[in-house]
């Protein structure tokens, strides 16, 4: 029995017991936190903050050009900018992709700039409109040098000639009385004396549109004086023999005759011109000029 205990077989039987502590150390080994176990897919990166920043910046960019609402776009742009910066910092620390935070950052900046620029444009337009309304509230509008030169270059029709004005009317200026003060004062006792002198214009119109029209609403008549100012019928509140308000609503082919008057300084009627244009036209090329002499 003694020799058998020293045999290689006995040594082999004892080998597992010798290696048990090493196996225990391997069994107790744990993966450091933050790293996937061997054979497992890496954990998904969290992009919630970047997504929120991107959504907010997109909304701000869409709203930045809408009047009034673009005030909200500025606030949303600032919020999106803060979220994008935070998401970019987190992505840098975690070594994540930075495409989404960078996109949110760029769009937020563009939204803020777009909202501010659009606000400046809207304020400028509103100021221009306000100034134009204020200047024209008395029926007199000053002309720029460019407008004067353009008016001088446009060929004027003679009295009694007809021309289409806009897409819905054919207009004929039959007569222009540059000193109609006595005639207008004789029409009614309530007519007051002008500050300058009354100019009386006789017109004939034909409606050529597809629906219906009121020429006293649809057409504007203006006198361009030699003093580089435009005078419209709102300068004259006198009662006329053929007031425009008495022209009925016209159908296609309907015709009407009426008069308009302006209160114009005596020195401004020399070399004056008359033009008719659609009321809602903002294009000077729609004007048709007539010579008043």
Image (cartoon, rainbow, N blue to C red):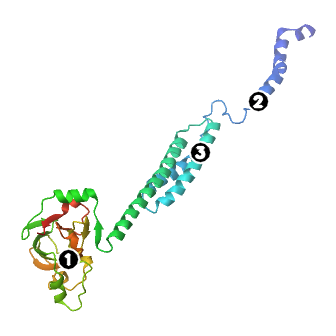
Depth order, front residue of 68/224: 224
Label 2, label 1: how many angstroms apart (C-alpha)? 96 Å
* Residue at x 24% of width, y 71% of height: 231
Residue 188 shown left or right of residue 48 in the figure: left
Q: Circle 1 sits on which residue? A: 216
For the point 19% across and 90% down, the residue is 188
Q: Where residue 269 sits in the image (x, y, percent)? A: 19, 70
At 56% from the left edge and 52% from the top edge, which residue is drawn?
A: 78
Circle 2 Cα neighbour tier, 10 Å, few/some/many (<14 / 14–19 / ≥20): few
Q: Quadrant of residue 132?
A: bottom left
Q: Quadrant of residue 39?
A: top right
Q: Which residue is mark 2?
A: 29
Tell me the element at label 1.
Answer: helix
**Residue on which disc 3 sits:** 85
Asked if residue 240 shows in the view, the reply is no
What SS does tag 2 mark? loop
Q: Nearer the viewer, mark 2 or mark 1?
A: 1
Name above or below for residue 281 compared with residue 86: below
Where 198 sits versus 104, above or below? Answer: below
Q: Is residue 135 left or right of residue 78?
A: left
Q: Nearer the viewer, residue 189 or 239?
A: 189
């Amino acid at each position: 029995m003694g020799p058998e205990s020293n045999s290689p077989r006995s040594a082999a039987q004892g080998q597992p017991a010798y290696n048990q502590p090493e196996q225990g150390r391997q069994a107790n080994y744990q993966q450091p936190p933050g790293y996937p176990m061997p054979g497992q897919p890496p954990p998904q990166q969290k992009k919630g903050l970047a997504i929120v920043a991107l959504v907010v910046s997109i909304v701000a960019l869409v709203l930045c050009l809408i009047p009034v609402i673009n005030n909200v776009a500025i606030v949303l742009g600032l919020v999106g900018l803060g979220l994008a910066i935070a998401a970019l910092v987190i992505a840098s620390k975690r070594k994540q992709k930075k495409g989404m935070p960078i996109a949110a950052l760029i769009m937020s900046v563009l939204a803020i700039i777009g909202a501010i620029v659009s606000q400046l444009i809207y304020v400028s337009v509103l100021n221009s409109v306000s100034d134009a309304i204020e200047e024209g509230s008395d029926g007199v509008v000053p002309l720029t040098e460019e407008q004067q030169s353009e008016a001088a270059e446009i060929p004027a029709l003679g009295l009694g000639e007809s021309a289409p004005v806009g897409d819905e009317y054919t207009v004929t200026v039959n007569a222009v009385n540059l000193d109609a003060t006595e005639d207008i004062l004789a029409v009614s006792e309530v007519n007051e004396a002008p500050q300058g002198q009354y100019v009386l214009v006789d017109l004939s119109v034909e409606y050529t549109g597809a629906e219906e029209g009121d020429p006293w609403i649809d057409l504007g008549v203006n006198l361009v004086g030699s003093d580089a100012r435009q005078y419209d019928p709102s300068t004259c509140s006198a009662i006329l023999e053929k007031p425009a308000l008495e022209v009925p609503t016209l159908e296609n082919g309907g015709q009407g005759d009426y008069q308009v008057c302006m209160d114009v300084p005596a020195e401004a009627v020399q070399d004056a011109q008359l033009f008719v244009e659609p009321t809602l036209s903002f294009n000077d090329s729609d004007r048709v000029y007539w010579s008043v002499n």
